[in-house]
Image: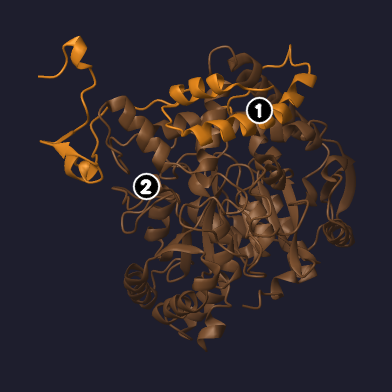
């Protein structure tokens, strides 16, 4: 099999080929390293390529496959968002303040993938501390969309999305606080899954907003997303918000017929300013769900219009507390000044980029004396209403379908001057984080030659139904066969 | 909601965030604008709505207080900007006027 073909494989196909002896993990890994060398100068999906680590892991994987003790992910090359800490590569969160930082421990998802024999190709670019919707807030330069290098890949996990879309990785991991997996998956034409809050351990995920953050996969197929979720889900004593119930076999939930499935259509997921090509592709996808046997049911999520404002109090408030640990004392950048207080101020002033500073300021303001009730507590109360909207809707439906984003990928630099315009890119994804429910984004067509994405939202801890419906649509619609011409 | 430079300076001081004069002014404009968008929440009557801090119905998670393996001092200090004799080294916490230091 040629190198080019090897980078087109899904994880499920790679496993078959590895076990049949069609190719080795070293060959598969080398093909991806070659692909990275060929295209990443243009795409900039990676901040660190772990070449030597990857080839060593690939050799070990080949031995494990030969010995008959391999896991489904053994020998499969994957990429990790550079916000997941690793002992054998730097972790920067795309921030100057962590430039050169090497963690003394592995995150739980990283350890779980190591145990399964996965191969780590490298660490992918992100908006600094996962704060952004375009990956333009990286301190190390933006990532570009593999479908059109003048467009953004979305964000914050733009590097992880682009790495899969550009065939620089078979699967990747990202994190989703307000849409940071689903929105870039949509912009890059790949599958992105945000699991239920508590499904995957956050230990070793550099914290942005701890009540919203969740780790999840990017892949070319829904089946691969299920394979990755199987590998990373489950209780972890190091994250007390991870739930104790053992996760089911998500791959077993894949289905092709949707008879008996009730799909909710929320009128709030049609907004003014939505791109016509997005509306038509998503409508066609919903019609296809019906053709596959699903029953369409109108639902209402009346507090959707307040989700963005709620998020931009809650997330910055939590971030302002989480990011207080970057103070030039224990790790990372220190800008020395005559006093300890000035060392804090100058380290943080020099080390953080403008979006991170903006959110620390917003969050600190919302938590400050005199404003705490009016902003922070108010947002927590509206969060209750947003969650109740979903609780009501899911009494009547199994999943809710709509667009992932109101537009396709926008131009690099086109929204950087107005923070609130940038925040609007996440208008359809934010509510799921507020309610803690799972969501998946998957390709459903093209507009202006760029991918359009269908978002499905599910009940808490019912990723099976979500993956089942997504798989049925994906197989029937066939968009996964389209790859970026790069 | 329009913030003053003094408001912004106060918040920056709470956040231990050093900002240049240009940054203070830009932050004043941008935060004021974001707060205007956020003011939409005041439309909703939430008097009888309980707050949600996190969505999983978990209460405090406890474990036995037993000794378990942990990272070595050496590994933890490997990333420290400055350390001495197994400690993190920083500027004096107490000001000289308060009789701190040696």
User: Which residue is more in the foreground, B52 or B63?
Assistant: B52
Q: Residue at x 78, y 51 (%)?
A: A406
**Subunit under mark 2:** A
Q: Residue at x 67, y 22 (%)?
A: B2
Which chain is tinted orange? B
Q: Is residue A470 left or right of residue A140?
A: right
Q: Residue at x 89, y 44 (%)?
A: A297
Q: Residue at x 46, y 28 (%)?
A: A321
Does A61 appear above or below B27? below
For the question of whether residue A248 can be seen, the reply is yes
Q: CA distance from mark 2 to mark 1?
A: 30 Å
Does A415 appear above or below A74? above
Label 2: state its secondary structure: helix
List the residue tagged with mark 2: A98
List the residue tagged with mark 1: B32
Q: What's the image's color scheme?
A: by chain
Q: Residues within 10 Å of mark 1 (few under 14, many from 20)?
A: some
Q: Nearer the viewer, mark 2 or mark 1?
A: 1
Residue A111 image position (x, y, % from top left) = 38, 53
Q: Are marks 2 and 1 on the same chain?
A: no
Residue A367 image position (x, y, % from top left) = 54, 20
Quadrant in the picture for the C terminus of chain A:
bottom right
User: Which residue is more in the foreground, A216 or A393?
Assistant: A216
Residue A81 image position (x, y, % from top left) = 48, 55
Does A199 appear above or below A17? above
């Amino acid at each position: 099999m040629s190198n080019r073909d090897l980078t087109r494989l899904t994880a499920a196909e790679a496993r078959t080929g590895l076990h049949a002896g069609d190719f080795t993990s070293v060959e598969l890994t080398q093909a991806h390293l070659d692909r990275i060398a060929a295209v990443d100068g243009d795409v900039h999906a990676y901040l660190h390529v772990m070449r030597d680590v990857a080839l060593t892991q690939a050799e070990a994987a080949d031995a494990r496959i030969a010995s008959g003790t391999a896991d489904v992910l053994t020998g499969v090359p994957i990429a990790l968002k550079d916000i997941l800490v690793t002992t054998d590569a730097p972790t920067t969160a795309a921030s100057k303040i962590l430039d050169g930082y090497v963690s003394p421990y592995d995150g739980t998802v990283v350890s779980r993938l190591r145990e399964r024999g996965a191969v780590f190709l490298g660490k992918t670019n992100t908006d600094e501390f996962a704060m952004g919707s375009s990956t333009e807030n990286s301190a190390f330069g933006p990532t570009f969309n593999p479908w059109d290098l003048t467009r953004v890949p979305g964000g914050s996990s733009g590097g992880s999305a682009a790495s899969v879309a550009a065939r620089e990785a078979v699967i990747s991991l990202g994190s989703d606080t307000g849409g940071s997996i689903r929105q870039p998956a949509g912009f890059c034409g790949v599958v992105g899954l945000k699991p239920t809050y508590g499904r995957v351990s956050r230990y070793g995920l550099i914290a942005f907003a701890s009540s919203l953050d969740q780790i999840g996969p990017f892949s070319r197929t829904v089946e691969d997303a299920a394979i990755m979720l199987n590998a990373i889900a489950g209780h972890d004593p190091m994250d007390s918000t991870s739930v104790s119930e053992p996760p089911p076999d998500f791959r077993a939930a894949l289905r092709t017929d949707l008879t008996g499935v009730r799909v909710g259509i929320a009128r709030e997921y049609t907004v003014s300013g939505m791109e016509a090509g997005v509306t038509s592709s998503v409508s066609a996808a919903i019609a296809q769900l019906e053709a596959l046997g699903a029953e369409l049911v109108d639902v209402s999520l009346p507090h959707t219009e307040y989700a963005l404002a709620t998020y931009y109090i809650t997330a910055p408030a939590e971030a302002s507390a989480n990011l207080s640990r970057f103070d030039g004392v224990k790790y990372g950048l220190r800008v020395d000044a005559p006093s300890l207080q000035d060392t804090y101020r100058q380290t943080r002033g020099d080390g953080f980029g403008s979006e991170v500073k903006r959110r620390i300021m917003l969050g600190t303001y919302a938590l400050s004396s005199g404003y705490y009730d009016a902003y922070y507590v108010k947002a927590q109360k509206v969060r209750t209403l947003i969650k109740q909207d979903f609780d009501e809707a899911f009494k009547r439906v199994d999943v809710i379908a709509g667009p992932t984003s109101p537009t396709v990928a926008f131009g690099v630099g086109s929204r950087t001057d107005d923070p609130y315009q940038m925040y609007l890119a996440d208008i359809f994804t934010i509510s799921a984080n507020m309610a803690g429910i799972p969501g998946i984004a998957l390709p459903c067509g093209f507009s202006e030659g760029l991918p359009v994405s269908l978002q499905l939202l599910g009940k808490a801890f019912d990723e099976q139904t979500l993956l089942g419906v997504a798989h049925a649509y994906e197989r029937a619609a066939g968009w996964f066969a389209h790859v970026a011409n790069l | 909601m329009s913030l003053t430079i003094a408001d912004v300076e106060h918040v920056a001081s709470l956040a231990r965030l050093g900002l240049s004069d240009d940054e203070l002014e830009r932050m004043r404009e941008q935060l004021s604008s974001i707060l205007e968008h956020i003011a939409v929440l005041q439309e909703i009557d939430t008097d009888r709505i309980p707050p949600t801090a996190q969505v999983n119905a978990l209460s405090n998670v406890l474990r036995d207080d037993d000794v378990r393996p942990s990272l070595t001092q050496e590994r933890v200090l490997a990333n420290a900007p400055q350390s001495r004799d197994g400690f993190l080294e920083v500027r004096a916490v107490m000001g000289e006027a308060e009789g701190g230091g040696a």
